[in-house]
Image (cartoon, helix red, strand yellow):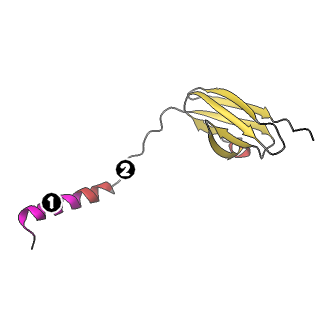
Amino acid sequence: MPTGSQAILFLLASVFLVSCGGTQTPVDPGPRGTVRFKCEPKDAVLEVDETRLGPVRMFEEKGLLLRPGRHRVVLSAKNHFSEMELIEVVEGKVTIVEITLREVPE
């Protein structure tokens, strides 16, 4: 049978563990701006700030939400020269990035 102090420690530990799994309030992502892409070829891979995001076609219609400020955008595709562009995202505004990758000559 646990002593009084052991029972209190067990009760406090149980309350702590139960409270860790409770409802959490969502974190406010802060201000954002939208970036839409109009790029060729459509299967070009999009990279923003050194993070590979996938085919650029995924971000044409709805765009991509980014924090305001300067961002590095890179597009690359097989048999094409890669392109890098620095863009400035403004809070609450839509920025459109248009890039056509040039084919590598054979």
Task: Identify the residue at image location x=12%, y=61%.
Answer: 8
- Corner quadrant of residue 39: top right
Percent of width and height locating residue 94: 64, 30
Disc nearest the viewer among 1 and 2: 1
Look at the picture and state if 45 lies above or below 94: below
Mark 1 neighbour density, 10 Å: few (under 14) some (14–19) many (20 or more): few
Q: Is residue 4 magenta?
A: yes
Task: Using the image as rendered, state which of residue 68 and residue 71 is in the foreground.
Answer: 71
- Corner quadrant of residue 59: top right
Please report the bounds of the magenta region as a residue range. 1-15
What amino acid does circle 2 point to? Gln
Task: Using the image as rendered, state which of residue 61 and residue 37 is in the foreground.
Answer: 37
State how far apart marks 1 and 2 are (Cα): 25 Å
Q: Secondary structure at mark 2?
A: loop
Q: Which residue is mark 2?
A: 24
Side of 86 where 40 appears, left or right: right
> Which one is earlier in the sequence, the residue at label 1 or at label 2?
1
Look at the picture and state if 80 lies above or below 10: above
Percent of width and height locating residue 37: 72, 36
Q: Quadrant of the C terminus?
A: top right
Q: Which residue is mark 1?
A: 9
Task: Identify the residue at image location x=44%, y=39%.
Answer: 28
Q: Is residue 49 magenta?
A: no
Side of 69 where 43 appears, left or right: right
Percent of width and height locating residue 80: 83, 40
Task: Using the image as rendered, state which of residue 6 and residue 88 is in the foreground.
Answer: 6
Task: Identify the residue at image location x=22%, y=61%.
Answer: 14
Task: Identify the residue at image location x=21%, y=59%.
Answer: 13
Q: Residue most toward the right?
A: 106
Side of 102 where 50 appears, left or right: left
